[in-house]
Image (cartoon, rainbow, N blue to C red):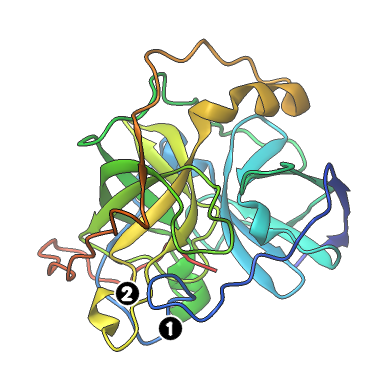
Amino acid sequence: MSSASFTTKALSVLAALTVASSSLLATAPAHALANARNVTGSSAPSDAIVRLHIGATACSATMITSTWALTARHCIPESGNAGAAVGSSTFSPFQPVAQAIIHPTADLALVELPHQGSTVDFYGSHVQPGEIGRATGWGGYAALGQKVAQEADVQIQRRVVNVPSPDRSAVMLEGTVTNGRLMPGDSGGPLYIGGQLAGVLSMSTSVENAAAQDGTVGWYVPVAEYTDWISRYTGKQIAPIVGTPAPVVDATEYPTAIPAPQPYTGSTIGGWAVSSF
């Protein structure tokens, strides 16, 4: 593994995002597994997925320019050796991470890598309830040693705030996951809609005494609401986002409906990936 120490540009004090004992949100346990599908083919969404390791933290990320990847802020510790591999297979070599820039409030971070060939564009509209996308991540590698990134389907239910979590002020997209499950190691990974980046995974369900429901709901940072910050530090040209954000719902006043996982009936079997903390 090629890795190097890196610099975190703390635009605010970097607080460790650890999950308190909660019946809703916590680290998905290793035994809470379900079937997903391998990321296949060569396309921008599959080629731009990043397997990120900083210190003891394993996460996912997405290449948004030739040198910058977008991930979750809680994936960035204050120090540690850092390496990243770009692509959907473990055959991709690890490369050093030069620096990380964290958002002052949102669960977003940028990591700088050597020049890459594959990048993705941002979804051009504010995401609305009912839209269907695809979650991709490396949690299957972190939990099971799988050699290929995994993907599952996500349907956005609502835009929420006050989710029982370390940051109740965070505004996130809440989506139910089918044909797969979210697992540790997928934090920071992408939500794609129409092959374009619409969200960054921040949290997923871990339900006390109901492991069958772990990873069936994910909460994503809506990247359309942070394009100014992303452009400022990466130089990425992002077209104006169409529409307006969906109304925000208080997730404590109106709690999340957590579904049981649905069986995956596709031809490819593999334990799934996309994380919590």
Q: Spatial distance from mark 1 to mark 2, Cα to Cα?
A: 8 Å
Q: Is residue 93 above or below residue 61?
A: below
Q: Is residue 93 visible?
A: no
Q: Residue at x 56, y 32 (%)?
A: 119
Q: Is residue 56 visible?
A: yes
Residue named by callout 1: 29
Where is residue 143? Give x, y as percent: 47, 79
Which residue is outermost to the front? 253
Where is residue 135? Give x, y as percent: 36, 50
> Which mark identifies residue 96?
none
Where is residue 60? Give x, y as percent: 56, 56
Q: Residue at x 25, y 74 (%)?
A: 213
The first of marks 1 and 2 along the sequence is: 1
Badge 2 amino acid: Asp
Q: Is residue 226 above or below residue 254?
A: above
Residue named by callout 2: 214
Mark 1, secondary structure of its residue: loop
Report whether 203 appears left or right of 101: left
